[in-house]
Amino acid sequence: MPLISYQGALIKNPETDEIVGHWPVDPAHARSLLDDFTPYLKDLSIHIYLNDQLYVRTITPQTQTYAERSQIEPIVVGDLYTFLAQNPEPTKVLALSDNPQIITVLLEQLKDRYTSDQLYLTKSVATYFEATNPIANKGTAVKFMAEDLLGLTREQVMVVGDNFNDREMIAYAGIGVAMGDAPAALKAEADWVAPSVEEHGAAVALERFVLA
């Protein structure tokens, strides 16, 4: 089966490497984000994903932790403006900070600066700011995969999510499940709330709605 990744911006078959769908960030907006990050640069690590590879200005402690967690080897390119000039269509722009408050402030500021037609902005965890193409979110990707690739209806789809970047797919699916660890606002929008990760909530949801 194809895998949905990068908040829905890339759908790729892991066996054949065929790209089924790709919605990159507009080059002008990607460069503009670098300007927006500048006042916070001492507290941010900027990551750019392109062609399923991770590119960074330098290796920071946050980058090292992220790379180990994600099992990916970051590629150091130095100046990111120069890199984007040569590689203008990144799949995702990611900013990391050890201070969750900076990510919250950045998200609030940039949601006022960019319209929903320019960028899709979210945070997958408290310390990750993520920017993708405006049509690239998990809801759009799940709908594309279910209806266009598999010939299913939304009523035949169940999704399980645990943070705000899962909001669109939970709204789309016939059964939208939030994990017990999810923020309260997300759980309020879900059709059902599963137990926590430690309690194997995803397995409980599958047993309840699929296997039964």
Image (cartoon, rainbow, N blue to C red):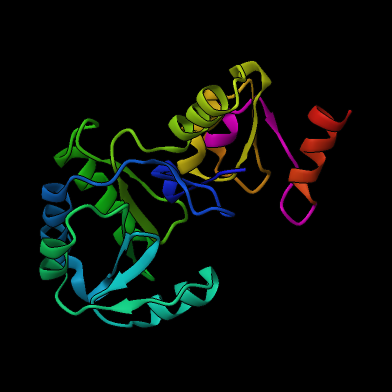
Q: What's the magenta region?
A: 186-199
Q: Residue at x 52, y 68 (%)?
A: 70
Q: Residue at x 14, y 41 (%)?
A: 113
**Residue lying furthest right:** 212
Q: Residue at x 57, y 27 (%)?
A: 146
With respect to residue 113, does 32 lie above or below? Answer: below
Where residue 19 appears, as percent x and y from the top left, is 43, 46
With respect to residue 184, does 5 lie above or below? Answer: below
Where residue 159 appears, as percent x and y from the top left, is 63, 34
**Left or right: 102 in relation to 141:** left
Q: Is residue 172 magenta?
A: no
Q: Is residue 194 magenta?
A: yes
Quarter where residue 204 is shown? top right
| Front residue of this view, candidates 110 and 76 | 76
Q: Residue at x 39, y 71 (%)?
A: 98
Where residue 4 appears, as percent x and y from the top left, is 51, 44
**Residue lying furthest front:** 16
Quarter where residue 51 is shown? bottom left
**Left or right: 26 in relation to 17:** left
